[in-house]
Amino acid sequence: MELVLSLGIGILVGSGVWLLLRPRTYQVIIGLGLVSYAVNLFIFSMGRLVTDKPPVTQAGAQIDPTTFADPIPQALVLTAIVIGFATTALFLVVLLASRGLMGTDHVDGKEPDR
């Protein structure tokens, strides 16, 4: 499971960085989204991938770290998903406004000579 997760994170980061280096604004936005998803998966995996474990312990119980799931990474990822969605929506609005004003969606604002 760890190998599949590591490969997935690596593929998402590699694809996201490749898209970030593209000259079109839409590709840059998609690249930011892919890198964001990779970071979310990484943070989520740091909370130990366990199943059928309670997220918190009961009061007065003997605390054994292997008997519960860490809720902090789950909360961080949930918050990051919401913020990432809002940021992507904002970037898309800026993309549409920029394309309407300049007539192009290149990152530097001008079309290359063909």
Image (cartoon, rainbow, N blue to C red):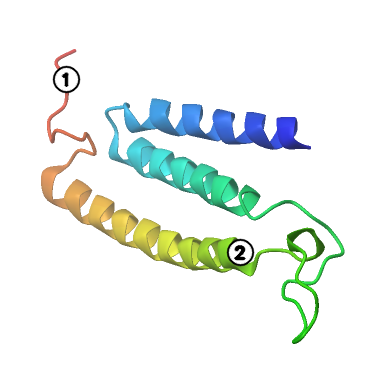
Task: Categorize mark 1 by other alpha carbons within 10 Å: few (<14), some (14-19), many (20+).
Answer: few
The image quadrant of residue 4 is top right
Left or right: where 107 falls relative to 50: left
- Label annotation for residue 112: 1
Which label belongs to residue 74? 2
Residue at point 24%, 56% (across, down): 94
Query: The residue under label 1 is which amino acid type?
Result: Pro
Mark 2, Cα crowd under 10 Å, few <14 / some 14-19 / many 20+, is some
Q: Residue at 21% of width from left, 47% of height from top?
A: 99
Residue occupying the far right of the picture: 52
The quarter of the rendered structure image containing the C terminus is top left
Q: Position of residue 61 (x, y in %)?
A: 80, 80
Q: How many marks?
A: 2
Q: Is residue 113 above or below residue 3?
A: above
State the image quarter where residue 21 is shown.
top left
Secondary structure beneath dot 1 equals: loop
Task: Return the x and y of residue 5 as percentages of the image width and height.
Answer: 69, 37
Q: Distance of mark 1 from mark 2, alpha carbons?
A: 44 Å
Dot 1 or dot 2, earlier in sequence: 2
Discs 1/2, front: 2
Give the secondary structure at mark 2.
helix
Q: Residue at x 75, y 71 (%)?
A: 63
Q: Residue at x 14, y 33 (%)?
A: 108
The reply, left or right, for residue 60 in relation to residue 39 is right
Q: Amino acid at mark 2?
A: Gln
